[in-house]
Image: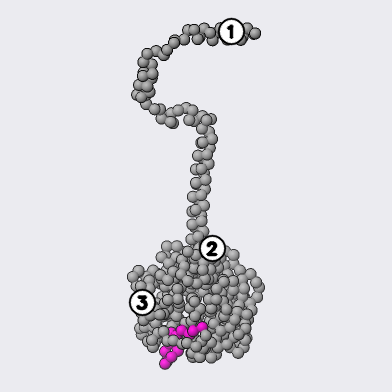
């Protein structure tokens, strides 16, 4: 046995022999009373809280704070991108949905602006003439006509809603008849799947419809020399394109591949932009009657024709509400019919409302949620200078958007709910 072990045993034996056999009387009560009246020290005053024992916790807290800050910054950036570009998700091509920007041309270029006027951005500058911006049915693309000068052929350009990614999908387009009266070669008719665009153009002495597919070069002519085709509009199922034959002034249809072209209806003297109902069951159009213009609907098979404006005279450019329950059109009033009011009619009911706000004869454009309509206002010389956002119920005040220099069509972006 070592000396160290023997010493340990002696010390242990001494401590046991010397310890008290019982705790001092009242010790437990005194300790409890002392604890009760002793205030607890604040956590931040305990030195050990700031030492290595809590280093991991501090690191986790700092990391969480950084993560929260980064997420907040990303949310702000995403909100700005969403405001400028709308959404990266496609909107439904038909039916009620959320409204995005209103797009219109002006002296500034192509402008996007919210209906309340709070946000405005020029996405295409005033380089030459850029007119008639038209959103695709899914809200993810914007097409417009462009030419570098005051005359010459047009190009059809497609961009993202923020103005980036410009792509020319058709070149060398002219349509003299429309350019003289409407300041553009053709309306821009997006297909329901937002992959194709139909337009009209001159081909020598003929007028024909063309279809161009995004991502592909070259446009395909789909109508022959037997018709002078203008103002194309796609049926919502994509099966046919309706158009005006400017020679016979009647409605025709043709498949997107050019097959099956035929006259749809005997309704005479049709003009301006026809438009399919959202369910594809009818086409609304303007037609001359008794030395005036009326609003008619034609069934998809061409057999049923109905006068919707009730022989009131001076009616132009019908458009369907997104849910197909209402029609809006421009109704002439005043000396020499220089201005129009907007008329709202229930398709399956007797209710007809005339909104007595001075507007233009151009097609009234519905917001994708059906809560607003926009039209235009021109000065005494016929130059457009405002886009008017109007409440169809007549309750909310009119919103005036500066559109000085506007000459083409405008459009409302569809966004997903």
Query: Is disc 1 placed on a helix, strand or loop?
Result: helix
Q: Vertical placement of 159 versus 34: above or below?
A: below
Relative vertical location of residue 97 with respect to residue 202 in this rendering, above or below = above
Numbered mark located on residue 89 in the image:
2
Return the disc, 3 or 2, that comes first in the chain's sequence.
2
In the picture, the disc for residue 180 is: none
Instruction: Decide: few, some or many residues near mark 3? Use Cα within 10 Å; few <14, some 14-19, many ≥20.
Output: some
The furthest residue to the right:
217
Q: For numbered disc 3, what is the local secondary structure? A: strand
The label number, if any, that marks residue 355 in the structure image: 3
User: Residue 130: x, y in percent?
Assistant: 54, 72
* SS of the residue under disc 2: loop
Distance from Cα at disc 1 to Cα at disc 3: 112 Å
> From mark 3 to mark 2, how far is it between C-alphas?
35 Å
Along the line of sight, the residue nearer the viewer: 79 or 393: 393
Q: Which mark is residue 7?
A: 1
Quarter of the view holding residue 330: bottom left
Q: In terms of sequence position, does the residue under pointer 1 or pointer 2 come before the other?
A: 1
Do the CB atoms of the residues marked 1 and 3 lie less than 8 Å apart?
A: no
Measuring 49% from the left and 65% from the top, which residue is drawn there? 415
Magenta region: which residues? 288-300
């Amino acid at each position: 046995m070592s000396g160290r072990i023997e010493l340990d045993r002696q010390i242990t034996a001494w401590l046991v022999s010397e310890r008290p056999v019982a705790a001092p009387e009242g010790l437990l009560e005194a300790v409890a009373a002392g604890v009760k009246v002793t205030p607890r020290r604040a956590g931040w005053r305990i030195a050990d809280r700031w030492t290595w024992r809590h280093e991991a916790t501090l690191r986790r807290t700092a990391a969480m704070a950084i993560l929260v800050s980064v997420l907040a910054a990303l949310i702000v950036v995403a909100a700005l991108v969403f405001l400028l570009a709308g959404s990266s998700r496609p909107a439904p091509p038909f039916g009620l949905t959320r409204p995005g920007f209103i797009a219109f041309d002006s002296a500034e270029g192509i402008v996007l602006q919210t209906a309340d006027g709070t946000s405005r951005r020029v996405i295409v500058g005033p380089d030459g003439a850029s007119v008639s911006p038209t959103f695709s049915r899914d809200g993810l693309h914007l097409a417009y006509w462009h030419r570098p000068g005051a005359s010459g052929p047009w190009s059809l350009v497609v961009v993202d809603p923020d103005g980036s990614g410009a792509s020319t999908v058709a070149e060398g387009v002219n349509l003299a008849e429309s350019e003289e009266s409407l300041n553009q070669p053709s309306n821009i008719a997006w297909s329901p799947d937002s992959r194709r665009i139909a337009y009209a153009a001159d081909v020598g002495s003929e007028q024909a419809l063309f279809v161009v597919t995004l991502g592909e070069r070259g446009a395909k002519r789909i109508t022959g020399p037997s018709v002078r085709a203008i103002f194309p509009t796609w049926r919502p199922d994509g099966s046919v394109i309706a158009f005006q034959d400017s020679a016979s002034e009647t409605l025709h249809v043709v498949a997107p591949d050019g097959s099956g072209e035929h006259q749809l209806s005997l309704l005479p003297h049709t003009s301006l932009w026809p438009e399919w109902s959202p369910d594809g069951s009818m086409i609304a159009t303007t037609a001359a009657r008794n030395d005036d213009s009326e609003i008619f609907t034609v069934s998809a098979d061409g057999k049923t024709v109905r006068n919707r404006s009730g022989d009131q005279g001076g009616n132009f450019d019908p458009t369907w509400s997104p849910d197909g329950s209402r029609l809006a059109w421009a109704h002439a009033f005043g000396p020499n019919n220089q201005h129009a009011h907007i008329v709202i009619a229930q398709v399956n009911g007797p209710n007809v409302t005339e909104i007595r706000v001075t507007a233009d004869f151009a097609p009234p454009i519905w917001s994708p949620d059906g809560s607003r309509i926009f039209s235009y206002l021109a000065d005494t010389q016929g130059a457009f200078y405002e886009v008017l956002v109007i409440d169809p119920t007549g309750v909310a005040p009119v919103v005036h958007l500066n559109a000085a220099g506007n000459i083409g069509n405008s459009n409302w972006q569809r966004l997903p709910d």
